Amino acid sequence: MAAKTVYVVTGTNRGIGLGLVTELVKRKDALVFATARNPDKADALHALAKEHDNLEIVKLETTSEAESQAAAALVKEKAGRVDYLIANAGIANLIAPILDTPVQKLREHFEVNTVGTQLTFQAFAPLLFASPSPHFVVVSTTVGSIGMKLPLAMTAYGASKAALNFLTAQVAVEHGDQNNLAAYAISPGLVGTDLGNQAVAHFGMAEAPVKLEQSVAGVLGIVDKATRESTGGRFWDYTGDELQW
Ligand SMILES: NC(=O)c1ccc[n+]([C@@H]2O[C@H](COP(=O)([O-])OP(=O)(O)OC[C@H]3O[C@@H](n4cnc5c(N)ncnc54)[C@H](OP(=O)(O)O)[C@@H]3O)[C@@H](O)[C@H]2O)c1
């Protein structure tokens, strides 16, 4: 069993995932497993790994059950448990109202954002249950909130993240008490990543309102203070405000 705090972060080749890993590896007591679909092309991660010996790059296409199981097996061998599973991998590649949303786009967003994250949870669940105080942290979005009724034509993305929010709440119900698991969703804000910049351009903004560093600091600020009782089963903004599911 690793003496350090064990983090697994998915989708870390770029964007918010890379930002999270860049901060986490600065912590001397952290052991960070950063997943990428194509480790051979993950240049920024390799550059980080050269400077930080507490970073391991793991291959993971999250829609693959076989790769999810293989990634979990590798982490089990090296660390024996996971304290924080941060499910960050996601896509948003269509901004369109429902009548202009091809059903294939709906399927594609569900496959990555919803199915992929469930596969990640299922593969890593035994390792989370081996931690005395595990966290399942889902990087979600206000676009997936039903209660907020945002007038954004992001049908496929929003629907897939609403379903992902349900899965997060379901994990909290099923494994909160039983496994002392804190499961919660966090919206990182609109950040100028490849994904975020599509929305920025579409909605005619000059730039994304939230800087990457600001978002990462906000997300990790919530994660660091989170407990099952105070945080689990709920949906949070990176600012620390609670959001409506
Ligand atoms: N940016 C925003 O404004 C914003 C706002 C709200 C929520 N979010 C959420 O934040 C998360 C990260 O988004 P981002 O802005 O950092 O996006 P991004 O820059 O487009 O990065 C997405 C990451 O997810 C990975 N990924 C995509 N599909 C994957 C799959 N099937 N298996 C494994 N990895 C996969 C990508 O891998 P490759 O590099 O190999 O493609 C990439 O590393 C997403 O869940 C997104 O919904 C972002």
Image (cartoon, rainbow, N blue to C red):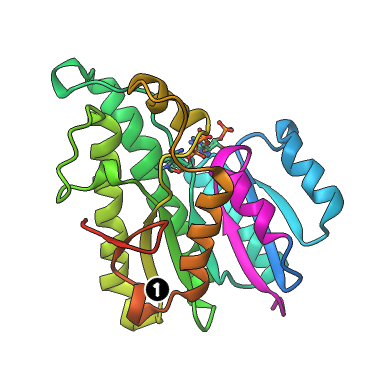
Classify 185 as above or below 172. Answer: above
The quadrant in which residue 181 appears is: bottom left
Residue 128 shown left or right of residue 81 in the figure: left
Q: Is residue 21 magenta?
A: yes
Q: Which residue is mark 1?
A: 182
Q: Residue at x 46, y 67 (%)?
A: 222
Residue 68 shown left or right of residue 239 in the figure: right
- In the orientation shown, which residue stands out farthest toward the front? 206
Residue 50 shown left or right of residue 223 in the figure: right
Q: Is residue 115 magenta?
A: no
Instruction: Work out which quarter of the rendered image holds the N terminus and state it.
Output: bottom right
Q: Nearer the viewer, residue 193 or 61?
A: 193
Q: Nearer the viewer, residue 223 or 89?
A: 223
- In percent of width and height, residue 108 lies at 35, 28
Instruction: Work out which quarter of the rendered image holds the C terminus and state it.
Output: bottom left
Packing grade of label 1 (10 A; few <14, some 14-19, many >=20) is many
Q: Residue at x 48, y 58 (%)?
A: 219
Q: Residue at x 14, y 43 (%)?
A: 149
Residue 147 shown left or right of residue 162 in the figure: left
Q: Amino acid at mark 1?
A: Ala
- In percent of width and height, residue 53 lies at 83, 59
Q: Which residues are magenta?
A: 1-25
